[in-house]
Image (spheres, grey):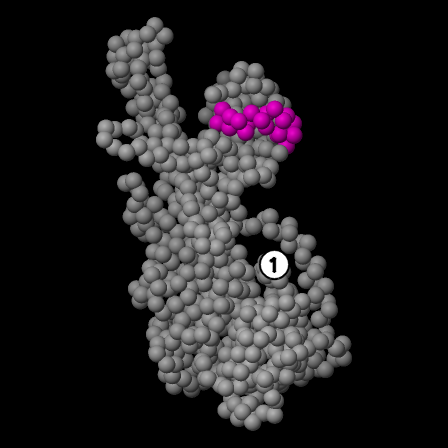
Amino acid sequence: MSMNPEQEALITRVFGSYLMEYHHGDMIQLIADANGESHRPVVVNAMTLFEASMEVGDCFVAYPSDVLSIFDKVLHRRAMELSQNADGTDRTKERRLNVSPHARITGLPVCPELTRDTIPRSRDIGRFLSVTGTVIRTSVTKVLEYEREFICTKCHHVFTVQADFDQFCTFAQLACPKPDGCNSIRFNCLSGGSDPAACRDYQEIKLQEQVQRLSVGSIPRSVVVVLEDDLVDSCKSGDDVTVYGVIRQRWKPFSDGAHCDVELVLKANNIEVNNQQAAATVAMKNVQKDFEDFWNNYKHDPIAGRNQILLSLCPQVFGMYLIKLAVAMVLAGGVQRIDSSGTKIRGECHMLLVGDPGTGKSQFLKYAAKIMPRSVLTAGIGSTSAGLTVAAVRDGGDWHLEAGALVLSDGGLCCIDEFNSIKEHDRISIHEAMEQQSISVAKAGMVCKLNTRTTILAATNPKGQYDPEEPLSVNVALASPLLSRFDLVLILMDTKNPEWDRIISSFILEDRGQCSENSSLWTMEKMKAYFRVIKHLQPQVCDEANSILTRYYQLQRQSDGCNAARTTIRMLESLSRLAEAHARLMFRETVTVEDAVMAVCVMECSMQGGALLGNVHALLSSFPADPGQQYQTQCRILLEGLNLPMLLEKEIRRLARPRTHTPSCGALGSGRFEDHGKLFSDLFELSIPYSTLCDTIFHSRFAIV
């Protein structure tokens, strides 16, 4: 069923008027821009077009393929008219015939009939839809012959045959089309594919549903998308895209005794890459004012405001103040820089959690994957190098590149659980992805480079019982080159502390419901919005912060008990990234002394046998009752150890300014655990040896019920 002549005339007239009113300048630019491209797009907003004529909208929904063909013909004719008006010479006319403009539709109304977040089904055949998903596979670009001339061997009638898209673009002519009824079935080809005008660029990609939009337990489905002409090479594996096109079905030519397999394909009319998430930028402006008001309330005690955010990070895990601070800093990330030679220095931070079973490592990974956009959560068991990076897949005789976890999470977060379960030769493949933020592919004759600008948050169990006397590489069975690429490596040791076990038991069995109902905690949506907002901050490191980071790096290099795998030049870059990440977390545009001190504190906890603070027990660190006093203690210890008395004096004077009282966070923001938060906050103040603190805990007068 097709349109009648009256409908075709209406569409031609309305679309021609629409082009002259809304796209006159685009067509003038298209004609004037002589860059050698034979196919040029003109983006048409569907909402504006449908408002001009609802009848055109009805025909577009009912007969999308026919209407799109009319759009291209009208666009080409209007462009020719403008070209002749500008320069009416025959030479110009011939030159302009080689430029083929295409109407690319965008801005469809948001309704279930036209826009989808899931892969269409067979009931959608023939519809024009907007489908959003992630590109997981791209094929090589091919040349497709879509038109061929034949001559009948009986009557010598010459006719043109269009390639049948439904049969994989094959030429199927059953009989001679001459009007006198020759009906011969024997033809000879005249063009034979040698005419470039009858060929076009062709590429197939595979689009998969976005995992974060699926319901629990659903397996993401995929669909093949066909790109032609100027749409070819407009996206790559790992991109989030919105494809506008018509749902078609195609099958291989029939043969005796063979099954006829029919598959759905999306013949693309337009494709938009959504990596920059421009739509989210508009929404961020609405919530940014709320965050500015939040920090204004804590401007006299910003550390307390930061701790309030950390309380909302993975609230189902009790305490673990240090771990939550490190995870928040890693999610915030640093600023990417380009040095004088043009080499990019990554801004994304990587962290490895090493701990005994049951210490909450997987909880942090799952929560972080929910917060960050473009996040992928995978496990080391069964993950190969191809599953993490990129795989060359053969399909129908052709090779395709299929994106792995690191490519799919480009611009987001990749969480890898059971990291030590990845095979040794597979771990080597992610070295380039972690440091250079790219993957060089040379497989099946395809040589290219894919971006992996992602933050890696990994978790692993130690090899047997963790031995503090042994180097980290021995405990976790990971090579030094791989460990040096992690900005932070935090150790979570289960020391079987009776008092701490009582607190955890009380939290899990009695007060978990009260914690989830705590109104002071931020919701998941607010946490997502906050990390989206701070990702756009570009904090600059001040000279005072630079001096702290440089002095600490030099001290670590000179330390007798330093870990050679960790104290490399990458450590200095990690310190800079962590300081920028803390500034982002504090909603600042400048990296201050406070940010540098906190970056050094977190790095000290990551080092085995720190140069200043010694061994720190990260698992038992709880939220301090007085965050300002805790920071002052840390600042004094670190700056005295780094021999920076002038900076210490200046920072103490700043902290001594009068400030308004801000409510204490406590261990969980609830009165029941505030006393215990004060008791265990000493573990992170670091001025008392851990063994002494354990004795204090066991002989404490606090009655923990």
Quadrant holding the C terminus: bottom right
Percent from the top left, x then y, of residue 575?
52, 72
Q: Which residue corresponds to mark 1?
A: 525
Percent from the top left, x then y, of residue 364?
50, 68
Residue 62 shown in magenta:
yes
* In-image side of 314 versus 233 (left or right): right
Q: Nearer the viewer, residue 602 or 191?
A: 602
Q: Nearer the viewer, residue 512 or 135?
A: 512
* In-image side of 674 versus 372 (left or right): right
Q: Nearer the viewer, residue 244 or 360?
A: 360
Which image quarter: residue 633?
A: bottom right
Q: Nearer the viewer, residue 683 or 702?
A: 702
Q: Vertically, is 156 above or below 265?
A: above
Q: Secondary structure at mark 1?
A: helix
Q: Would residue 528 be seen by someone viewing this image from the given angle?
A: yes
* In-image side of 467 versus 278 (left or right): left
* In-image side of 486 versus 658 (left or right): left
Which residue shows up at 53% across the image and 27% down it? 62
Point out the stretch of residues depicted in magenta: 48-66
Q: Vertically, is 568 above or below 533?
A: below
Q: Residue furthest left?
A: 257
Which residue shows up at 51% across the image and 28% down it? 64
Residue 152 shown in magenta:
no
Percent from the top left, x then y, of residue 186?
25, 15
CA neighbours of label 1 inside 10 A, class few (<14), some (14 to 19), many (20+): few
Q: Vertically, is 427 above or below 476?
A: above
Which residue shows up at 38% across the image and 62% down it? 430
| Tally of marks | 1
Task: Give the amino acid at mark 1.
Answer: Glu
Q: Would residue 344 be seen by someone viewing this image from the given angle?
A: no
